Image (cartoon, coloured by chain):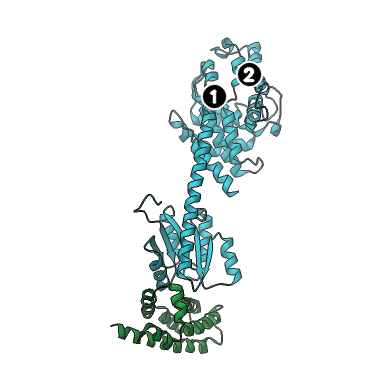
Chain colours: A cyan, B green
Amino acid sequence: MSENKGYKPSILITDDSEMNREILTDMLEDEYTIMEAEDGVQAIAILEEHAEEISLVLLDIVMPNMDGFGVLKIMNQRNWIEHVPVIMISSESSASHIERAYALGITDFISRPFDAVIVHRRVVNTILLYAKQKKLIEMVEQQIYEKEKQSDMMINILSHIVEFRNGESSLHVLHIHTLTELLLQHLIHFTDRYPLTQSEINLISTASALHDIGKIGIPSEILNKPGRLTDEEFTIMKTHTTLGADMLSELPVYQDEPLVKMAHDICRWHHERYDGRGYPDRLEGDDIPIAAQIVALADVYDALTSERVYKKAFTHEVAVQMIMDGQCGTFNPLLLKCLAEAADVIQKEFQDSVPVYDNQKAMKNIVKEMLYK
Amino acid sequence: MSLQSCYIALEGNYDDVIGRLRTERLVRKFVLKFLDDPSYSNLCASLEAKDYDEAFRASHTIKGVCQNLSFTRLYQSSHQLTEALRNGWSPEVEELFSQVSADYQQTADAIRALQAEGA
């Protein structure tokens, strides 16, 4: 702000009276870039194009075509009101008008006739306050991101070691992370059966990387056997679920950490089936934690679409169809709905050979949730 | 005619306006601008056309401008007319409108006198 001397924040003045606009412009144009709208419709058109640059809206109530309340309603619908402060200036000074305006998210209400010094001071204060808040939000995001990045890196190195020994693609872990996150975002959109917050979604996605750590305890002849496993070998292979879970529950530290608990559940139950025919505990339906259900689905999809020692890779379409047809186990119908809905996005994300998991975006979602809920 | 005597002629409150807008330059600028404001002719035209929504808005705007400029006399009559028009036509509209017209003429005459002197 102050370090950038040529920069003038923009103010949108919305008033049907040219004279009113001019009085305000005259008071503010030395310090601010002024945009003008004659009615609500024009104001919305200008906001549509410049919502990112506008630092403040001065808004009249009674105007032709669309009044000030109409403008506020649309600013709420499009979430502009969270970033663009509005000061209402009106001669409609009845309590019900003022109350309604505050309920619609205005920062301040100035009654006509206004005092030039007061208007000027409130404009300056509001703009400074919002600029500071924006800066703080960015700093918090950056801090959380840096902190998460460290633990994310450690987890990825660890799971890469496991995958390395499995001879599986080291992209598997990244794929699972991306898929888990995508499926969960879809899930919370169309059902409130699993009330997950953005930080829980992030926790599950992070913990998903550890789903196969138990494989470290499986002999490599079995892990990397090109042909079909014998019954006996398969029995041993299946223990990677309990091995992983036990490793985590025997950790000398961090026993009560949500990440460790989450990773434990995912390790132990990511081979359970919705119909109760999975392993190791034959859990059924929602007795299987939702995190484990999601990772199981992500795991199957990625196994199908990747090349393995014993099989070629299926295309995205074939893999989705096979899962939908129940050829690869039974899943929660809600999760299948998620997969169907997310199918296009998944295909797009995985077109590039290395899906870049956008951790920064996840951090933004978390900070947004902290601020606005 | 000085700006102060103009306010006396149009029955406004000079002390109030200078207290709020702070400089004589600004007050003079907008007082002179008042003659260009189309709201009064909008009001006449929309009442003629029986468009009471539009008449309400025009009257509301006159009221707002008068409030800004502390044109007390015209503010009072336009305020009453605005309330009478808030829910469409009402029996008092006619009488209140003729009061607004008279006050508008008085205001406009005073400003024209100020303008003539400045020129």
Q: Is residue A109 visible?
A: yes
A222 to the left or right of A71: right
Looking at the image, is A205 positioned above or below residue B85?
above
Name the residue type under label 1.
Answer: Ala
Which label belongs to residue A239?
none
User: Which of these two is toward me, B45 or A121?
Assistant: A121
Figure disc tally: 2
Q: Position of residue A58 (x, y in %)?
A: 46, 64
Q: Which residue is at a point 52% across and 73% down the rendered structure image? A: A91
Q: Position of residue A149 (x, y in %)?
A: 51, 32
- The chain carrying label 2 is A
A199 to the left or right of A174: right
Q: Position of residue B100 (x, y in %)?
A: 47, 86
Q: Which residue is mark 1?
A: A303
- The chain carrying label 1 is A
User: Which of these two is toward me, A166 or A323?
Assistant: A166
Looking at the image, is A76 positioned above or below residue A181?
below
Mark 2 secondary-structure assignment: helix
Q: Which residue is at a point 60% across and 65% down the rendered structure image? A: A99
Mark 1 secondary-structure assignment: helix
- Mark 1 Cα within 10 Å, few/some/many (few <14, many 20+)? some
Q: Position of residue A346 (x, y in %)?
A: 50, 34
Name the residue type under label 2.
Answer: His
Farthest top residue in view:
A221
Q: Is residue B65 visible?
A: no
Which quarter of the picture shows residue A248? top right
Residues at marks 1 and 2, common chain?
Answer: yes
Q: Which residue is mark 2?
A: A240
Residues under labels 1 and 2: Cα distance? 16 Å
